[in-house]
Image (spheres, rainbow, N blue to C red):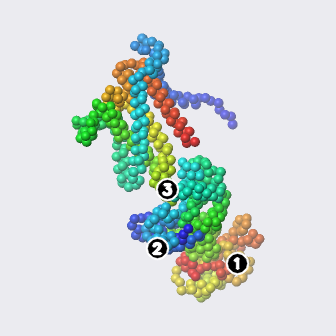
Amino acid sequence: MAEIRLQQLAHSYHNNPDSESDYALKTCDYLWEDGGAYALLGPSGCGKTTLLKIISGLLQPSQGKVLFDGVDVTAQSPRQRNIAQVFQFPVIYDAMSVYDNLAFPLRNRKLAAAAIDRRVQEVAEMLDLQANLKQRARGLSADLKQMISLGRGLVREDVSAILFDEPLTVIDPHLKFTLRRKLKQVHERYRHTLIYVTHDQGEALTFADQVAVMSEGTILQVGTPQQLFEKPVHRFLGHFIGSPGMNFLDCQVRQDEVVIDGHLMDGHPLRLADGIARRAGALTGRLELGVRPEFVRLCASAETNTVPVSVQEVQDLGNYQLVNVQCGKHMLKVKVVEAQDVQIGAAWLQFPADMTRLYNNGHLVE
Amino acid sequence: MNKIQNNKAWFLVLPVLLLVAFSAIIPLMTVVNYSVQDIFGPENRLWVGSEWFKEILADERLHGAFGRQLLFSALILLIEVPLGIAIALCMPVKGRWVSVCLILLALPLLVPFNVVGTIWQLFSRVDIGLGGRIIDALGFDYNYTASSFDAWITVLVMDVWHWTSLLVLLCYAGLLAIPEAYYQAASIDGASRWSVFRHIQLPRLANVLVIGVLLRFMDSFMIYAEPFVLTGGGPGNATTFLSQYLTTMAVGQFDLGPAAAFSLIYFLVILLSCWLFYTAVDHGSR
């Protein structure tokens, strides 16, 4: 178990990268604390697998260092780093039995037979593989094969960290839930440092204590699921996390208030928390308000911090209503509880001051 | 809807039936014809039943040729399969050397069989051949026309030169088909180079190796042109394999009856080994 630190790390698959866009992973510094459960979330091709391979030692970074507990391991092989990794598609040794598959990483490290047996039985019990231990791994279903891969990742007690590269891609949806819970239990029991790569926000947010969101080779934000949801630091995160994503509206600052669409909503200025509007007054470039569909409130009459809108469409999604409203020249999505009666036509939309964010050229104004 | 009852579609099979008849059944029946009769001329023949078969099965020289044939096939499999795997493992995976290696390897496969025999016949001669002279100069008493051991070595080396490439190419293709993730997983599991070979590469090569072994066994079991040109079966009968013995019997001595019986047995032996092989593989994969 170890704390993993990345120092000035960057990677390019080109031999002579000359522009920023040649880098699959742009320069970053980051610390994964010992014993934490982390998720690395991002769309396909954002560099998360590259980052994972650099941590495990399968890939040498173009620049920068990887430190485990303060020791520079950049030049070490995966074996020396004592890391475990589970891949997207099941990798099993198909000529061996399930038992031998699970025992393989331990046998390679010359453990005593009794110790190996104890660990294999323990892992098999954890993953419900006891009944299959004697079977040949070849003919098993994709689910079971991935369980074996998972088991091989968990079987060593002394690993520095366990890395998961979208391990649940091939698993049945109903099993995914069980497995995710298993992984959480395993983490609570052994306190390994876990890093879990995924493009599925649901998976990331339920699995991890800390989620790092990546886009185009950069880690944009690291935080708890709640922080990512309530205070995304970049426009990308607003869109990427949550379903539907954040609403964005062009706006202008007037002293310590904000006006949507410049003069269109002149009579209805909005207040933001903590004097953010005042600070944004000095900024140049595009200013946008960002607010989640969950946090805006649809009202029948004018209240504090409301603007007039027109309700265009109401979709009943069973547990809530998704309402499309027009506000100035923008279309917004609003989540409304089932009990509230929503009519097409004129209404008022309330922007809670503490849940409405201001973005300057895509970056959060704080 | 009424199902139309019509068996005319069977006529569509007719062309294939005719083709198979002309390409396989009729020639084979000719051989069967000769194997059960003693034919002196178109109007002069005698039914002999299984006599030729009995005669040929008791033929000591045939036993000898059969034994040498089995030994030859076994030896070249023992040499070519491991050698093919070893060379395939050493091949570059990318870069310009890949095509260079592939072309070099494919060359022996493109040489006609008779030419292979001629090349090695000249190459191995002690008086004018490069190989023969070198071995001689190194102090070995080498002469493939006089010593049966030397003749065997030469025939084996010739076959290895000619056919190992086939196994290399098959194994190389098999190795390239192994996903990168397997090597990464092995490296993370701390597997040694030998473990990677034993537990990842070899099991994943099994399928191509089966095809390779089958092809090489069949081909070597029917080998004719190369040893015929190189040693002519000699010295003595030392390198006379089944095909050559058959030719001597049928063309040289014109013993058509025994030769036909021999051909049928030869054919059945190959068919049988094919079937045994297939069953073993099929059984093993389950």
Task: Check contact, mark 2 vs mark 3: CB within 8 A.
Answer: no
Host chain of mark 3: B
C-alpha separation, residue under disc 2 versus residue under disc 1: 49 Å
Pointer 3 residue: B191
The amino acid at mark 2 is: Gln
Query: Disc 1 on helix, strand or loop?
Result: strand
Residue at the location (49% across, 15% down)? Answer: B49
Residue at the location (53% across, 77% down)? Answer: A361
Residue B222 position within the rendered picture, expressed as x and y whole percent measured from the top left: 41, 31
Is residue A76 shown left or right of residue B236? right
Residue at the location (54% across, 36% down)? Answer: B279
Write down the quadrant of residue A249 in the picture. bottom right
User: Mark 3 Cα within 10 Å, few/some/many (few <14, many 20+)?
Assistant: many
Pointer 2 residue: A8
The disc, 2 or 1, on the residue closer to the chain's N-terminal end is 2
C-alpha separation, residue under disc 1 versus residue under disc 3: 66 Å
Pointer 1 residue: A348
Tell me: residue B153, above or below residue B50.
Answer: below
Q: Quadrant of the C terminus of chain B?
A: top right
